Amino acid sequence: MDFVRALRSAGAHPGGLHLEATPEYVTECVERPEDAHSPADLPRYRSGCDPRLNARQARRVVKAFATALAA
């Protein structure tokens, strides 16, 4: 994970993450930019503010962060 590598190379400790997440099945964030070309590609975009991760996406981010910390 680039975030962890960047902090460690600067001598800092990655203390944690802040995620905007929801238990709702939303499509407000995509994993790759090529997955969203138009609003039709995000059929369950419901946030009036910051886009949120759905539960599956949040788990993937947390797992990647934990794996990077353990390395």
Image (spheres, rainbow, N blue to C red):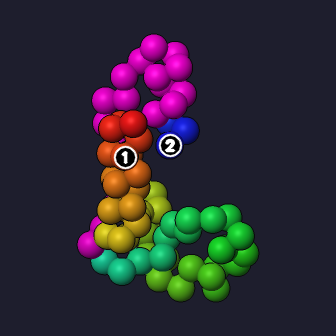
Main SS category, magenta section: loop
> Residue placed at 62% from the left, 82% from the top?
41
Left or right position of 39 against 16: right
Identity of the amino acid at label 2?
Met
Residues rendered magenta in the picture = 4-23
Left or right position of 39 against 46: right
Q: Nearer the viewer, residue 40 or 12?
A: 12
> Residue placed at 45% from the left, 57% from the top?
50
Identity of the amino acid at label 1?
Thr
Q: Is residue 69 part of the magenta span, yes or no?
A: no
The residue labelled by disc 2 is: 1
Which mark, residue 3? none
In the structure shown, which secondary structural element does the residue marked by tag 2 occupy?
loop
**Which badge, 2 or 1, is on the more N-terminal residue?**
2
Residue 32 falls in image quadrant:
bottom right
Residue 62: where, in percent of width, then height?
A: 34, 53
Q: Is residue 19 visible?
A: no
Residue 30 falls in image quadrant:
bottom right
Residue 17: where, in percent of width, then height?
A: 34, 41
Q: Can you name the residue that lies furthest to the front here?
A: 71
Query: Mark 1, residues whose alpha carbon is within 10 Å: few (<14), some, or many (≥20)?
Result: few
The residue labelled by disc 1 is: 67
Q: Can you name the residue that lies furthest to the top here?
A: 11
> Residue placed at 54% from the left, 28% from the top?
6
